[in-house]
Image (tube, rainbow, N blue to C red):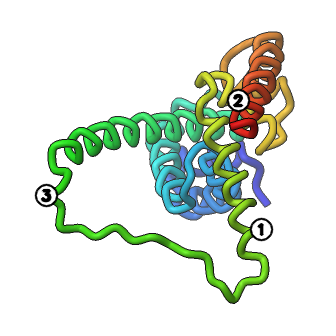
Amino acid sequence: MLTDSELIEDILDNNSQKAFEELVNRYQPLVTRTCLGFVNRYADAEDITQEVFIEVYQSLKNFRKESKLSTWLYRIAVNKSLNFIRKQKRHNNLRSIENFFTVGNSSKSESIEIASPKSADADWNIEQEEDKQMLKRAINSLAENQRIAFVLSKYHDLSYKEIAEVMSTTLSSVESLLFRARQNLQSKLLKEINK
């Protein structure tokens, strides 16, 4: 099996499609998991993953070999995910404005999903899903740098040093971001629970 450096050389020197496919196969799960830490839907994470590898292919010649390939991929995945979230927020804001002016004129019927009564664990499943959504909302409400540091730490098990590399910041900044993220999450979750 070729090392990352050998794969990169083969891609750059020989325009090797096979080497690029191997690079994608090697890192696609990591990139998809990273994106999934920021977006709610797996399909969106897959789309962002494709965008990440398109950018990798187009800018591989600019990769600085003194850093690890995985760190560079994390950075691209985080940035693409955040850009996606920003676009979604703008799109949702526009949709909200549009809906405000068309309320009552819509011919679309709203559907309500109901848990299957056949499931003995339906109530428990609903509670679990509500807890997940509450946690996701709390994480998404963190300041951007806190959210990035928290997701990379808790969902991807990156060390503080690796997070500092991905975020282009210092180790002490990462420690501070994670401390504040934990405090803010605890506060937000306690407020949600006590509602």
Image coords of residue 67 (percent x, y): 72, 28
The image shows residue 72 at horizontal and vertical percentages of: 64, 34
Which residue is found at the position 65% from the left and 38% from the top? 74
Query: How busy is the neighbourhood of tag 2: few (under 14 within 10 Å), some, or many (20 plus)?
Result: some
> Whole-percent x and y of residue 172?
82, 10
Q: Position of residue 47 (x, y in %)?
A: 47, 56
Q: Amino acid at mark 2?
A: Lys
Horizontal side of residue 165 vs 91, given as left or right: right
Q: Earlier in the sequence, mark 3 or mark 1?
A: 3
Tell me which amino acid carries mark 3: Asn
Instruction: Identify the mark nearer the N-term, 3 or 2.
Output: 3
Where 94 falls versus 107 (above or below)? above
* Residue found 62% across the figure and 83% down from its top: 116
| Residue that label 2 marks | 188
Q: Classify mark 1: helix, strand or loop.
A: helix
Q: Quadrant of residue 155?
A: top right
Residue 117, by quadrant, is bottom right
Is residue 129 visible to us here?
Answer: yes
What residue is pinned by disc 1?
124
How far, Cα to Cα, is label 3 from label 1? 38 Å
